[in-house]
Amino acid sequence: MGFGGISPWSLVLILLIVLLLFGTKRLRNMGGDLGNAIKNFKKSMSDEEVKAEEEKLTKQNEGQVIEGEVKEKDKV
């Protein structure tokens, strides 16, 4: 027995039926679409991490004066 009571021959039969139903071209397109979706998801996750890190650094550096920078005095 294989995965959860499904034999390897059953898996081969299922794969053949799926191949006959959808065809190789459609399966290839679905695989490409799935790959692009995963790639875009990973990219968006890394972009959010970069933005969060930039915001954290901005908040840390708010009160600091950079050399040569003129800070306005509060008008009373």
Image (spheres, rainbow, N blue to C red):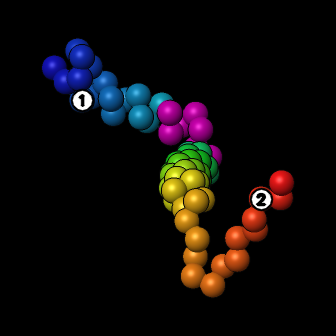
Foreground: 40 or 32? Answer: 40
What is the three-letter code of the residue carrying label 1?
A: Pro
Q: Which residues are magenta?
A: 18-26
Residue at 23% across, 15% down: 5
* Labels 1 and 2 touching (C-beta < 8 A): no
Instruction: Report the residue that reaches farthest toward the top.
Output: 5
What secondary structure do most residues of the magenta stretch adopt?
helix
Residue at 75% across, 65% down: 73
| Closer to viewer: mark 1 or mark 2 | 2
Distance between the alpha carbons at the discs numbered 1 and 2: 77 Å
Q: Which residue is mark 2?
A: 74
Does 21 appear in magenta? yes
Place of residue 6 in the rendered image (x, y in percent of width and height, measured from the top left): 26, 19
Quadrant for the C terminus, please. bottom right
SS assignment at label 2: loop
Place of residue 7 in the rendered image (x, y in percent of width and height, measured from the top left): 23, 23
Q: Earlier in the sequence, mark 1 or mark 2?
A: 1
Does residue 43 appear in the picture of this structure?
A: no
Q: Is residue 18 above or below residue 61?
A: above
What is the three-letter code of the residue carrying label 2?
A: Asp
Foreground: 41 or 61? Answer: 61
Does 5 appear in magenta? no
Residue at 16% across, 20% down: 1
Q: Which residue is mark 1?
A: 8
Instruction: Report the residue that reaches farthest toward the front.
Output: 76
Residue 25 circle label: none
Residue at 60% across, 59% down: 62
- Mark 2 surroundings: few (<14), some (14-19) or many (≥20) residues within 10 A: few
Does residue 22 appear in the picture of this structure?
A: yes
SS assignment at label 1: helix
Foreground: 59 or 22? Answer: 59
